[in-house]
Image (tube, helix red, strand yellow):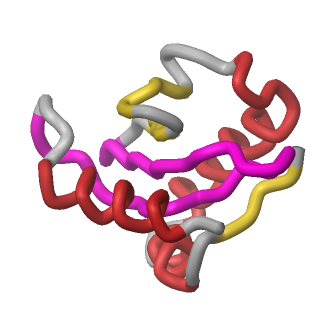
Amino acid sequence: MEVYFFDDAVERFIDSHDKGIQTKIGRMLVLLERYGNQIGLPYSKKVGKDLFEIRIKGSIEVRIFYTFRRNRIVLLHGFIKKSQKIPKKELEVAADKLNRLV
C-alpha cells in the first residue's frame, strides 16, 4: 500500500515539526505501508467507521487520522493531542475530509 495526502494541510502539519518528530512520523508511515490494516495498538487505533489514527508518542503526542481507499492509505488530518479524549473539532475535520473522498 502507498500513502497519499488528502490535501496540503496534512503535509504542512508534518513539515511544521522538528526533524525528530518528522522521523518518528516517517517510521510510522513505513510500518503502515508495510502492514496496512494489520497494524494496531500502540501504533494505530480505530476511532470511527473507516477512520483510524496514527499515534506518535514523544515530547509531544502527534495524531494523524487516516483511512484506506482503493488499496491506498490516505492521510486526512493531523493534530497535537493535549488531552485524554480526541477533541471533537479535530474528529469533525477528519470526518468531513473522509466524507469528501471519492
Q: Is residue 73 left or right of residue 67?
A: right
Residue at 48% over, 58% down: 98
Question: x%, y% of residue 82?
Answer: 15, 46
Query: Can you say which quadrant of the picture contains the C terminus?
Result: bottom right
Question: x%, y% of residue 54?
Answer: 51, 39
The foreground one among 91 and 49 is: 49
Residue at 32% over, 43% down: 61
Residue 32 occupies which quadrant of the picture? top right
- Quick check: 40 above or below 11? above
Question: x%, y% of residue 66?
Answer: 55, 49
- Quick check: 93 above or below 23? below
Q: Is residue 87 left or right of residue 71?
A: left
> Main structural element of the magenta stretch: helix, strand or loop?
strand
Determine if the magenta segment contains residue 43. no
Residue 22 occupies which quadrant of the picture? bottom right
Q: How many marks?
A: 0
The foreground one among 84 and 96 is: 96
Determine if the magenta segment contains residue 81. yes
Query: Can you say which quadrant of the picture contains the N terminus?
Result: top right
Residue at 46% over, 25% down: 45
- Quick check: 18 above or below 66? below
Residue at 56% over, 85% down: 8
Question: x%, y% of residue 58?
Answer: 40, 38
- Quick check: 62 above or below 8? above
Which segment did they paint magenta? 59-83
